[in-house]
Each structure stands twice: as C-alpha cells, then as structure tokens.
Image (cartoon, rainbow, N blue to C red):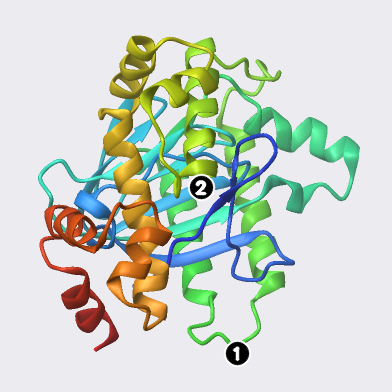
Amino acid sequence: MNAKTTYCSTFNLDSSETVAYNNPLFPAYVRHGILSSYPDYSAVSHWHNDLEFVVIQKGSMTYNVNGELIDLHEGNGIMVNSRQLHYGFSPEHKECEFICILLLPKLLSGNEWFYHNYIEPVTENPLYPYLYLGKEEWQNAILEKINRLYAFFPTEPCQELPYFSMMDLFLSIMQILYENLDVKTHGTAKESNELTSLKSMIAYIEEHFAQRITLEHIASSGTCCKSRCSFLFKKYLGETPIAYITKLRLQKSLAVLLDSDKNIADIAYEYGFCGASYYCETFQKYYGISPLQYRKAHKT
C-alpha cells in the first residue's frame, strides 16, 4: 500500500472529522503511513466516531489523546476510542512507519440490543479514552488481528475490499475488548468543558482555514477569551492556535501539490497563505524542502 497519501478531511455537523474511507459506502479506512508526510513530523489533532487502531511498524512516535502523551514503539500500538481528540507526532523529528485503521462501530449495529449491550460498553466507556496495545497477551491478539486486516487489504484501487474478512476481524477485536475491559461502568462518557470548547475552535478553523482567521475569531467560536483559547491549545495540543492553523493549511495543500500541476501561487492562495513566497518559506520550515522539490520527489 502506497505511503503517499493526500489529506482532505472535512467536518460533520457535530464537528467530528469526516473520514475519507477507502470505499465511501463502507466505513473502514486502512492505510500505511509515514510520519514525515506530515508537517513538522506531526499530524493535525482531530477526532471522529470511528475507533482508530495504530500499529508501529518501524521507529517510534508519541500519541496525544486528550492532552495525555503515550509513547509507541515498534511492534506495539494504540486504540483510540470514539470521539477522542488525538494525533501522532515525533518530538525528535524522526521517521516512523505505521499502520492506521479506522473502523466505525455502527458497522456492528445490525441488532440494536446487541449493539447497546456489547458494543457501546466499549465505545462509550469513560474509563478508556484510549488503550495501549502490547503489554498483555489479549492486547497482542488485537495487534495480530490488526496486522491481518491490513495484510488482507488490496494494494490496487481496482481490487475489491475483503468485506467478510474485515467484519469478522472487527467483531473478533470487539469481543476481545468486551471480555477484557471493565464494561460495568458503561454509560455515555461526559466530555469536559475544556475539550468541548477546544473542539469547537478546531471545527471553526477547519471550516475557515482558507480565509483570514484571527485569534479573536477562534476564541469566540469556543465561547472563551483569547488568553483562554491560547491556554487550551497549549494544554491539549502543545502549540499555539496560529501554529495549528499553519500545519492544517500545509497538510491540506499536499493533496493539490501532489495530485495536480497547479502552480505554487495558486495553491498558496487557495489554502490561506498570503502569497507564494510565504507558502514556500513556511513549507521549507516544516518539511525541510521546497514545495516543488517535494512534488518532484514524491511523484518520482
């Protein structure tokens, strides 16, 4: 599976990310990723209703889930539960290869009674915003199934997805989670006011990233003051709102940079930069090479 991936996510009405599934009609996302394809070796923080499974194939990375940092190394991984704010990054700017699989719990909602009693106790459990995978035997069993799911996945766009195998493995993973987690505390997880405010501000940035955005605009979208806005970004994301906007614009611009022949000036203006020179300067800062060099290297 090709590591070169374009990024063009959008947000739903509830401010969660709309995942670009491999098949738009089947909510499963499977790909191989490399951390250097993200600006400054850091993905942009996001959330979605899907369960996210990440397995490190080579190197290491740090995962941020709701502001908590988890170190991941070769051979282990993480499951991020539904609707949790998260992203992966390398503080040392080192390469990391990984498998990323997103599976929507609603895939298993054919029977309402079963879904409420056996799936939601995992996906709606306030005790588990994430789960580190690699310490216990049952966690290694989940890692093995994630690796199998990835191995089953077709390498060419024209190949049909292994739907039966995917459903079988997903159900097996949910069974392992249900049998090994404390599901007695099942109930809708209540989100903190801070995370709710931060998610609103991120959704505002996502919607207006191509326009001029001020700190005041962002703070207003989260119903807080400018200092509170900056505090929340620093606390949960480890960066300023302006840095977040810059990374988001750069990441989104990759889709057009790699999959079209548009000139740099057009791309710069389309993705919220004030001109080609500033776009090139910022791109060089975060990726280490110019946009044209990046385009040439990845197309080659």
Identify the element where label 2 is drawn.
Answer: strand
Residue 30 seen in this snapshot? yes
Q: Is residue 69 above or below residue 90?
A: above
Q: Nearer the viewer, residue 106 or 203?
A: 203
Q: Is residue 263 left or right of residue 148?
A: left
Which element carries disc 1, helix, strand or loop?
Answer: loop
Between label 1 and label 2, give the one nearer the viewer.
1
Residue at horizontal 47 percent and vertical 37 percent from the top: 205
Residue density around tag 2, few if under 14, some if 14–19, many if 20 or more, within 10 Å: many
Q: Residue at x 63, y 19 (%)?
A: 189
Residue at 10 percent across and 45 percent down: it is 92
Task: Quote the CA–CA distance across marks 1 and 2.
Answer: 25 Å
Check residue 158 in the rendering and tell me which mark sits there, or answer none: 1
Q: Amino acid at mark 2?
A: Glu
- Please report whichever mark, 1 or 2, sits nearer to the chain's N-terminal start: 2
Q: Position of residue 228 (x, y in %)?
A: 37, 10
Neighbor class of circle 1 (other Cα within 10 Å; few <14, some 14-19, many 20+) is few
Three-letter amino acid code at the position of disc 1: Cys
Asked if residue 203 lies left or right of residue 186, the reply is left
Q: Which mark is residue 52?
A: 2
Question: Could one spot residue 43 in this view of the protein?
Answer: no
Q: Please provide percent x and percent y for residue 253.
A: 37, 62
Q: Residue 5, image x and y in percent?
A: 40, 69
Q: Is residue 222 above or below residue 247?
A: above
Q: What is the quadrant of the N terminus in the image?
A: bottom left
Q: How many marks?
A: 2
